[in-house]
Structure formats: structure tokens, C-alpha cells
Image: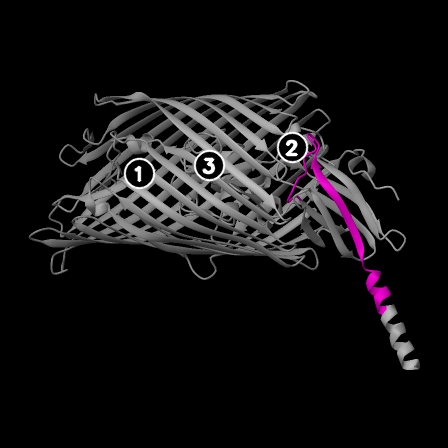
Amino acid sequence: MKACLLNLSLLLLTFCTFAADRGVISGKVVEQVGGMPIPSAVVAIYVTGTEQPLITSPTDEDGLFKIGSLKYGSYTVKVQYMGFVPVVINDVVLSGKEPEKRLGTLKLLADETNLDEVTIEAEKPLIQFAPDMLTYNVEKSVLAEGSTASDILKTVPMVEVDLDGNATISGKRNTRIFIDGKPSDYMTSNIADLLSILPSDAIEKIEVITNPPAKYSGDGEGIINIVMKKNFKIGLGGNAGSTVGLQGNTNMNANASYKSKTYSINGGGAYRYNIRKNTNENFRENFFTDTAFYFNNLNSNRNTGDGGNYRVNFDWNVNKNQNLRISSSFENNISRSNSGAYNHYLDEERIERNLRNQLTTGDIKRHTFVFDADYELNMDTTGGKLSVGLTYNDNNDLNERFQNRTFVPANRNPQLQENSNGVTNNGLTFKADYDRPIFKKRDHIEVGLMYTFRNNNNDQRVQNFDFDAQQYVVNEKVSNQFLYQEDIVAGYASYNLRGKNWGAKAGLRGELTTVHFDLSSGESYDIDPYLSLFPSFSLNRNFRKRYNIGASYSVRINRPRENSLNPQVNNNDPLNINYGNPELLPELTHQMDVSFNVYGERWSFVPKLAYSNRRAVIERYRSVDQTGVSETTYDNVGANTEYSLFLIGNYRPHRKISTNANFSFSQASYKSDINSSLNRTGKNLRGNVGLSMELPFKTAFEGNVNYYNNISAQGRNKGSITTWMGARKVFLKNKLNARISISDPFGRSSNSSYSEGVNFRSQNYYTSNTSNVTLSLNYRFTRISKVKIPPPSETAPKAKP
């Protein structure tokens, strides 16, 4: 009997102890405008004073959440959903007297309402998913300070950065690069240079938009939008830092901001010194009816470059209904290169018959200036908003090269050649957008107009040395001036429909394009104005607390631009010349995808199926003549159809450990009615795996591995693997940040590819000195003004006891 009583007492004690840990926090999340519940909003519970969430949970289809099994104590609750201002509720206390806290109805405000809620800000995850967009929050990355946009992009899921620094979405060649929602790739002659110097400290987040809505330009198969920081805390703040690497690379940057209640000023600058070394080996087989011969090209190059990027921004809340933002940026870059090329000619028996040596020195000077002005007006109490923007850009690029060619055996005279290529590019963009909630503020309508003007002047002058006259003589065959002008007038309308736990958006964009270009040699081209229509549609549905299914469709265009239209001949390598094609037609793409998102407390998984059909595909096309000279130009090579499967996931085995991975597999088919040799089918494979950890002593670790390969109309890129890892530690009450990074520790980045045509096969192997160890130091200073924070009862009504 005593044993039974003892067991019963122990059981009761265990139950009481267990029950003591059964604290509960519950509530409901809705939109402040319209009162619609918000399903799949992320509710994070933090132990007061900690930086990592104890547990996270999504709301159900009615916007409700209930989180239990919490120990008694003090907590902070943070609620967020993409497109809304996050809300934080502090000092939520669970105790034996009050084991359950009902927070009531939490109302989230759309971020477009432009409220000064700088004191209410939720912790954002590193990666956020939406049916047609992925958001990478830069501030949560180890690379957030002391790095560049190019460094950050290498860690973003679905984004590939090649060895030349060009970024694409899953290998899509027609990916556009935007900054703050505005095209930036056409404002500079080399977008890779801009990405390599744009400091990560100034970047808030990166949006990967796979199916852009009607508001965006119809150009490109997808958009990478780099969003710069704007919402600074009231007061004075900033940071300064420096990065040095074993390869000799150096990076320095500084940013500062000041914000009052009605205006803010921020600016910054960055300087970068970079050393690049690469090698390239190309072996080409040339076969004809009665003979065959071979070329083996070996090339090594060393490039040093330095430059800066400088930005200033002024933001003024004229009154509660008006906002004016003015910003400008200036970028300059100077690079110097030295290369040696050795071309071995082999006969049919693969016996070397002659050798051509070429030494090249070059200098490139470029600068880019961009000015932006944006005005917003909240027109009435219904929430209507008018936005007007003006952008001007100016870019200048001067590329000078000197080439010295010698031959073995010495039965040919040496050749000296000077190339000077000057490019000026300027443009003007005007846009006006109006959006307004309708039907009890639950739906949304958007309309807008945009005008874009672009002007490009490409002046190429080539001189060859005349040994008899002992002077340089202009080579008229390859010297020319190319003048290009483009005007696009666009308009769009879209309707956003929202139900209880579903949403749909449909839009239509129209663009009228006028293009004119001519050559100094006398040829003139007037392309008849053409109208292009770009419908877009997306649908998503939330159900059963943790699921979301979405589908989207859009039509996109890839217009031939000056680089692909310009018929100027580039003969830097006389055996491999290239030029543009003024007869190119625009390429149209129909693309659609279906995604299924599922979320758990510690994980998320997003499988996606995608389909695209491209017509009049613009790609490089190579042919070889009887002398073995390779001519590469652009052509509409035919049609391309691609089916893709994407698998994107995130898992948090511990509140301080996060892993993410994304893989894609696709099958692409080319079909040409012009050239049957272009008919081919192949598979593309891409993958990215990342790990981040919060370690003791205010230390963090992050690393990732990337792999990709892809097919083209005439061959395949056989694949490339890049790796990166870094550790960060903070000192002096989080003011000093120290980071050590290692890129490609297992060897130089390399890329292998092959291409083939009717009478040739070519294999190429490229390497670059990406292996490096860098050390970064960054110091942050702040002087924040006191801001009254509303009590929790004003943010979220408490239930009556």
C-alpha cells in the first residue's frame, strides 16, 4: 500500500512538473486595412534578451496561431509576413497564475503605407519564399559587412555567378539586373564590374523574381533586384571597414546616415583593388572533304583593376501624404591587362607546322553616373498612391589594346596592331505608377506608364604598323563607328484579387519599340516600330496551416541590343573573329511554373515545376571557313523548349543552426528549321548547399557549395564547382566585426565546355585564381535619438483576464 501511495505521489509530482512547462501564447493575425486574416504569417517566439528564436510557427488559413509547451518566463513575440510591416510584442510573461497569454488580434500594415515604424521590426529569416519570388535578406548573412554584391549573389539560391562575375537565375542567359526596381544592366558597359564593387553594407536584400509581374519591363526571362538600404534609425549611424586577401585584393568602404523625423541623408563609398589571373586552353578540330587540321590555343592573362563606387541619397517626408527621394551614384574603374597567346597549327597527322605568338597589353577606363528622383503622393483616404520617377544615366568606356604577333618559322613578317574602342551610352527613363485598393480595400488595382530612351555610340579604330613606311595605318576594313538609338513607350494595368485564404493577380503590359542604327561606312537600318504584349498571371492558395500552392505565367522578350547588332569585326585573335548581326529578330519567351510550399516549425520545402518556350532564340553561332578561321556571330538559332524541376529547402535542426539547399534538373531541346545541326536535346543540372551556425562567444559560421552545367545550341558547358566558407566574430558590444573567409580552398575554379558545327569540334578549358583567403574588419557607430515605443497594448490588444 505504501509503495502504491509512493508511486502515485511521484506520478502526481511528475505531472505537476510537466504541467508547469505548459505555457501557451495564442492570437490572430489580420490585415489592418480590410481585416482579412493572413495565413502563413510567421510567428517567432524569443526568450527575452536572446537573438535567436526559440520556436517559429505559421498561422493557419484563418490567421490563427497557438504555440504551447513553453516554460514559464518572459518572451518576445515577433510576427511578420512578406509585404507587411513586421510587429514585435515585448514582455509577454507566462507564469503559474497566467499560463496562457491571448494576444488578441494583431493587425499588420502593408509596407507601402510608408509609416515610420522603425522601432517595431521583426527578425527576418535569411531566405523567404513566395510563389514567383525568392528574397535573400543580406543582413542575416555573414557576408553582410565588408563584402560586395558579387560575393553575396554567389550565396543566393537559384543564382549563378560565372567566372567572369556575371549573375543569372538558374543559368538563364537573359537575366536582368535591377537596383531598387530599376534596370541597371543597360546603364553600364560591364555589369560584372558594378557588382564586384557595390558594397554589401549598403544592400538590404536581394529579390530573385522568376516570373516578373506587369509592373516590370518585359525584357529578360527573370530579374535579380538588389534593394538598397533606406529605412535608417533616427539619429546618426554608419560603418567603415576594410578587407585584404592573400591574392592581393583589397576592399575599403564607408557608409553613414542621418535621419530626423521628416528627412534622412545617407551616403557611402567603396574602393576595390583586384588582381585576376586566368588561363585558357582551346583545342579545335577542323575537318573538310579532302583534309583535316588542328589548332591548339594556349592563353594566359593577368588583369589588375581598381575603382570606386560612391552613392548619396536624400529622402524627405514633405508631409504625411508626400515623399521625395533623390539619389545619385558614380562608379569609376581602371584596369590593366597583359596576356600571352600561343597558337599551334597541326596538320592532318597532328604534326606541328607553325606557331603564332601574340603578346597583348590593354587598358580600360570606364565611369558611370546615375541620377534618380522619385516622388510619391498618397492621394486620398482610400489608399490611392501616385508614384513618379525620373532616371538619367551616362556611361563612358575607353578600351585600348596593343598587340604584337610573331611567327615560327619566321617566313612571315611580324604584325603590330593598335585597337582603340570608345563607347558612350546614355539614357533617360520616366515612369508614373498609380495603385489603389478597391472593394472594401481587399483588392488592388495598378496602372502605369513608362518611357525609355537609350543612345549608344561605339567608335572602333584599328591601326596596323606598316614596316615599309615605318608608321601606323588605319585598317578601314575593321574600323567603324556604330550609332544606336532606342525608344520604348510602355503601359500596364494589373488587378490583385484577394480572398479569405487565396489570392490572384493578372496583368497586361504593352511596349512600343522603335530602333534605329547606322554605321559610319554608310549603312543605315530603320527597324519598323513594333508593339509587344506581355500578359502575366499568378494564383496562390493557402490551406491547412502549413501549405501553399502557387502558379504563374508570363510572356517575356529578349530584344537584340547594340552588342549583338553591331557588325564591327573584332579581330583580336585573327583565327577567331566575332561580330554582330544587324538582321536579328526579337526573341519571345512563354514561361510558367507551379510550386507547392510546405512549412514546419523548423523546416520548409518548396518543389517547383517550370516550363518555358523560347522562339527565335538569340545565341552565339560559330562557323569555320576553308582556311580554318572561326567566325562567331549572333543568330536566331531556332526554338528552345525546357522542362525544369526545382527543389528548394531549409532546415533548422537547432535554433542556432540553419541549412538550406536547392537543386534543379531540366531538359532542354533546340529545334532549327534553318540548320539541322542545331537540333539537339540535353540536360541541365544545378545545385547549391549552404550551412550557417551561431556559435558561442558571439561567433558565426557560414559556408556553401555551388555546381552547375548547361546546354547550348552548339554544345555544352560541362560544369563548374565553387565553394566558400567564412567565420565572423563581434567585439566591443557588437560594434566591431571581424571575418575571415576562404573561397575555393580545394583549387582554382575551372570550367570545361565544348561546341561543334558542320566542320569543326572545339574543346575549351578555363581556370581562374578564385582560391583566396580574406580578412575583413568593420566598425559600426551609432548615435540614436530616443523614440517613444508604444506599449504592447497599442500594438496588440490583450485579452481580458
Q: Residue 35 colored magenta?
A: yes
Q: Is residue 134 left or right of residue 30?
A: left
Q: The C terminus lies in which quarter of the figure?
A: top right
Q: The N terminus lies in which quarter of the figure?
A: bottom right
| Residues drawn in magenta | 14-41
Name the residue carrying label 1: 617
For residue 205, the mark is: none
Q: Mark 3 is on which residue type? A: Ile
Q: Is residue 209 left or right of residue 580?
A: right
Helix, strand or loop status at disc 3: strand
Sequence-first disc among 2 and 3: 2
Sequence-first disc among 1 and 3: 3
- From mark 2 to mark 1, how far is it between C-alphas? 39 Å
Q: Could you tell me residue 106's position as x and y percent?
A: 74, 39
Residue 230, picture quadrant: top right
Q: Is residue 366 left or right of residue 434?
A: left
Name the residue carrying label 2: 111
Q: Badges 1 and 3: C-beta atoms under 8 Å apart?
A: no
Q: Nearer the viewer, residue 281 or 547?
A: 547
Name the residue carrying label 3: 177
Q: Decide: is 163 above or below 633.
A: below
Instruction: Sort mark 2 into few (<14), some (14-19) or many (20+) by Cα contacts within 10 Å.
Output: few
- From mark 2 to mark 3, how far is it between C-alphas? 23 Å
